[in-house]
Image (cartoon, rainbow, N blue to C red):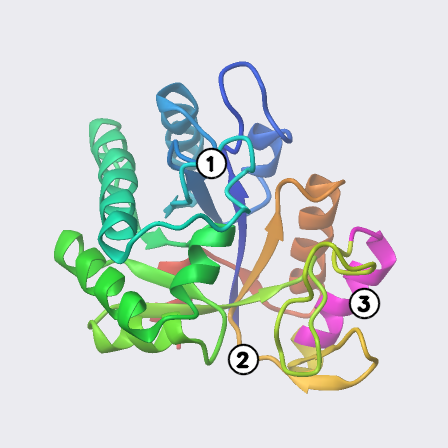
Amino acid sequence: MKIDVNSDMGEGFGVYQLCDDAALMKVVSSANIACGFHAGDPAIMTNMVRLAKAHGVGIGAHPGLPDRQGFGRRELPFSAEEICQQVAYQLGALTAIARAEGTHVSHFSFHAAMGNIVNRDAALAQQVMELVARINSELIIFAQPDTIIEVAAQAAGLKTLTLFLADRAYDAQGRLVPRGIAGAVINEESALRARVRQFLQHGTVTTIEGEEIAVRARSILVHSDTPGSLALATIMRSEIEACGHQVAPAAEVLQSR
């Protein structure tokens, strides 16, 4: 089975960066590139596109709310129209940079608060997904399984790839545990290795309450700002390969179904 390993990347600004993006690009198969609002700038975006192209990594737009100070994790009171405009602006910027570098954007993954806002509002999700489809109907939408975003993307005629967030805790309802709660972020190597192996072998994850729930996914995400993200991504890839699977970009994963 082909499995995608993806990470949110290019989440710096100017000379500042969160992790070793160049090293991480050698490990992942899909890169969700910050598009200049919550993080990123034209130089970083261009460098990320060049690195992804050089390593055969799928290029994805990772739009967020315009909130650098809050790293796009604070919910701000934008209207539906404003959120659509922000998505179009960011997707358009990365699309132009990728085209200038002789490649293309293949997927789309919301960042933090923007994704949370869209995923609570079916009408807004449909409006955004229809906008994305008008811009590029070939994009693959990354989403957690059985969510409003997944349903809206499919209704708009877009392909979807569902995610397992290896470095985040889940609750019994299959929701991510808020970051402010102890244990919400998993960055201990043995714990992450066990979670990935459990997901690959049994299709389940153990929740923060200690229950096992099913996870329907073909892509595993590690956040680049999680401490030790490079080591964690390397563990994820090694576990996938040790279980006899192949790491591949999102487009190849979908083709292999």
| Separation of residues labelled 3 and 2 (CA atoms) | 17 Å
**Residue 237 occupies which quadrant of the picture?**
bottom right
Foreground residue among 132 and 99: 132
Name the residue rendered at 50%, 42% in the picture.
72
Q: Which mark is residue 216?
A: 2
Which of disc 2 and disc 3 is earlier in sequence?
3
Between marks 3 and 1 in the image, the one whose residue lies nearer the viewer: 1
Asked if the stretch drawn in magenta spans residue 189, the answer is: yes
Asked if the stretch drawn in magenta spans residue 244, the answer is: no
Q: Amino acid at mark 2?
A: Arg
- In percent of width and height, residue 176 lies at 64, 67
Q: Amino acid at mark 3?
A: Ala
Which of disc 1 and disc 3 is earlier in sequence?
1
Which residue carries the number 1 mark? 67
Q: Secondary structure at mark 1?
A: loop
Name the residue rendered at 53%, 47% in the picture.
74
- In percent of width and height, residue 10 lies at 49, 32
| Separation of residues labelled 2 and 1 (CA atoms) | 32 Å
- In percent of width and height, residue 73 lies at 55, 47
| Separation of residues labelled 3 and 1 (CA atoms) | 35 Å
Foreground residue among 76 and 118: 76
Foreground residue among 246 and 95: 95
Indicate left or right for 208 with 96 as reference.
Answer: right
Which of disc 1 and disc 2 is earlier in sequence?
1
Which residue carries the number 3 mark? 194
Q: Secondary structure at mark 2?
A: loop
Provide the residue span drawn in magenta.
187-199
Residue reaching furthest to the front: 77
**Residue 133 occupies which quadrant of the picture?**
bottom left
**Residue 148 occupies which quadrant of the picture?**
bottom left
